[in-house]
Image: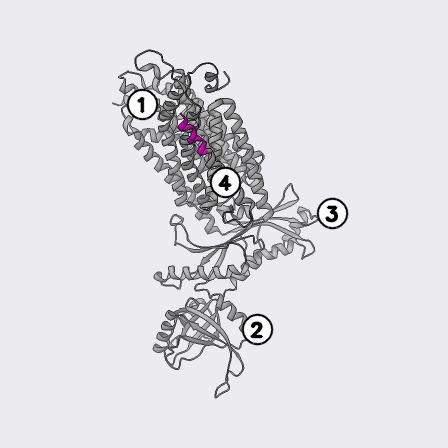
Amino acid sequence: MWKIRIIALVILIITVGIGYFNYSSEINPDSRFPFKLGLDLAGGAHLIYKADISELLPEDVDVSMDALRDVIERRTNLFGVSEPLVQIEKSSVFAGGERENRLIVELPGIIDITEAVKVIGETPLLEFKLVNEDAKPLEDGEKFTQEKFNEMFITTGLTGRFLKRAQLEFGAGGASNYLQNEPIVRLDFTKEGGDLFADITKKNVGRTLAIFLDGDLKSAPVINEEITDGSAIVSGGFAPQEARALVRNLNLGALPVPIELVSTQTIGASLGKDALDKGLRAVAAGLIVIAFFLLFWYRLPGFVAVASLAVYIIIMLALFKLIPITLTAAGLAGFLLSIGMAVDANILIFERMKEELRGSFASDIDGTQTYADTNTAIKKGFARAWFSIRDGNISSIITAIILFWVGTSLVKGFALTFGIGIIVSMLTAITISRIFLYAFGKYENKGIIKFLFNSGIK
Amino acid sequence: MFVIKYRKIFFIFTGVIVASAIFSIIFFGLNFGIDFTGGAIAEISYKTADFEKEKIPSKEELEGQLRNLPIGGFSIRPTEDDSFILRTRNLTEDERMSVIKALSFNGEKDVIQKRFNSIGPVIGSELRNKALVAIGIVIIAIILFIAFVFRKVSEQISSWKYGIVAILALIHDILVPVGIFAFLGYTTAVEIDILFVMALLAILGYSINDTIVVFDRVRENLRFNNENRSKEEFDITVGKSLNQTYMRSINTSLTTLFVLLALFFVGSEATQNFALVLAIGIIAGTYSSIFFATPLLVTVERLSNKNK
């Protein structure tokens, strides 16, 4: 008896400890474990870009997308926002058609997307293409189309992805004074890029290599010899300012593939804060009503249910901080629903306990009506309710897993808190409630005890 | 249990509900929001002091500003807190800037852009397909799970039939809120957005739980009868099980409804519809597990034993 009371006490102390952790990490602004709020609650911008991979070989797609993500990530760091998120996403297999490669950019706290879109979009697209000498020149009146362009310039595969760094230099002039004092941009390739460049230059001596920046032809030098030192020079009649900006942008990363903005979502910080405040207030109000209902209807066991529900909420909040789980409106909805499930487990158990106390099952063994004492009722009540709780919760967990697997990011947030909530609620609503109930001790079911363990309005 | 005895009346009632839900969906149609169709929605307000409220432009003035922009059809709706909600097709960044410029009367007024969403049609249709696929997979997985869990009590009716009955109840639970929202979409322009779909998914999880609890009790009583070699008609067992569980079903739904009502009345506008869909779904789910799914078990048992 005392053993179980000590365990109950230990649980209470641990819970208070976790509660204190939740509280202290929330009032301390430097804490390593703040609640992470999603864009819809904290305000910010959510941008979806579609990557144009039509010119890539299938095996290059993944590498290029990774490179694209790194580049955009470096650029978003320019904003100084706390945690920009840049993710690659493939369109769903269920959507039909060709799978699109997308880039999702989340910028918490950025409301004016004009600037955001500009900085991301400014990332230069650097391409090296060989001029096709066999291509027919444009005839008079012939329109310059994409097909014509593709015919005239052959993709080499050398792009900004292979760039190590760019430097601003001024032409030394040389014999012909060709580039005297003109700003030129020197490009150093990575090892891989250098090899590719050497290969291209070796095989195409005498041909023209066109250097495109954001689709504009910047310069088209003739390859004189194989270049093995892994660097190239772009000279396009830059103004010094222009060249400087280009070098900065190239160093931040040239885009390996062109991208197109297909979806933007922004939510103002005040709107997000409003949603959060009201949401929290609603949850608190709902919980208070639930607590009163449980106390009124289930009395002593109801009190225990409220206590274990409090433990449940404290544990969940700590998990949100520790894992960490980014909280969104959808995530809060999942959490809310899991509270309903946690209470459900206790209601199932209490209804079964009540049946035991009434003797409906105890009478069947030898025909005599024996009323269970409270301990026996608790034991049997839990044992009999367990199968319903297990099956109901497993079906909910199946639902959560499928939603997490198939869903979009919003649905995933819902599924995650819902799923974790159900698992934790099985611990608190079953194990912890049981310990609390046992801690009250063993009594005959009569008098005040009968009242306390009964339920309803009777 | 009277529900079992008068089950035909409840079947007719359920049938009427489902039929009117389907009718509502077909007749009114579903008012899909931009989450699914693609398009743009912006909420804007004007920075003015309280005593200068008259400086906030009227809806007509704003319409006049936007009419000449090449953005196609649009709609402006004033909200209660002096904001405006603008809907258009999905906009590019340049188009968005031109819209904001027009709404600021070329910089004369200070526009606050509270939110702006622009969703391409591809993303929208993909979202819709994903949601449908998710619902489909959940339904199949749950039939399989129930068939598995009930495999040991398949004497009266085979276990997968429990699964089918549960899913029929589930379809009812989904159709009712969708039908009501089709009607609301027609009368009050409520839109079906991604939160709506999430609420439906939550109803799936919740009401299957509700049905399983009753079925579990049936299973337990069947097993109990088996062990004690007591012969009992299937409908008596089912009625008894229902009697033993309806209190729990109602109480559980009540507790969840408390939270949802709080969310509806106290919570933010963004989750109001979500709370409403869920509340309707949970009421429908509790109704269907008591008055539809469980009596249906008896009917299924009658039918399958008649054929033997």
Q: Which amino acid lies under the numbered mark 4 shown in the image of this protein?
A: Leu
- Please give the residue where the numbered disc 3 appears in the rendered image: B52
- Please give the residue where the numbered disc 2 appears in the rendered image: A241
- Rendered location of residue A409, percent (x, y): 45, 47
Few, some or many C-alpha atoms within 10 Å of disc 4 (few <14, some 14-19, many ≥20)?
A: some
Tag in front: 2 or 3? 2
- Please give the residue where the numbered disc 1 appears in the rendered image: B301
Check the residue under mark 4 and report the chain it is in.
A
Q: Is A59 placed above or below A38 here?
A: below
> Tell me, what colour scheme is on the image?
one colour
Q: Secondary structure at mark 3?
A: helix
Tag in front: 1 or 2? 2
Whether residue A449 is visible, yes or no, is: yes
- Rendered location of residue B282, percent (x, y): 47, 31
Give me the C-alpha separation between circle 2 and circle 4. Answer: 50 Å
- In the rendered structure, are the residues bearing label 1 and label 2 in contact, judged by CB atoms less than 8 Å apart? no
Few, some or many C-alpha atoms within 10 Å of disc 3 (few <14, some 14-19, many ≥20)?
A: few
Few, some or many C-alpha atoms within 10 Å of disc 1 (few <14, some 14-19, many ≥20)?
A: some
Q: Earlier in the sequence, mark 2 or mark 4?
A: 2
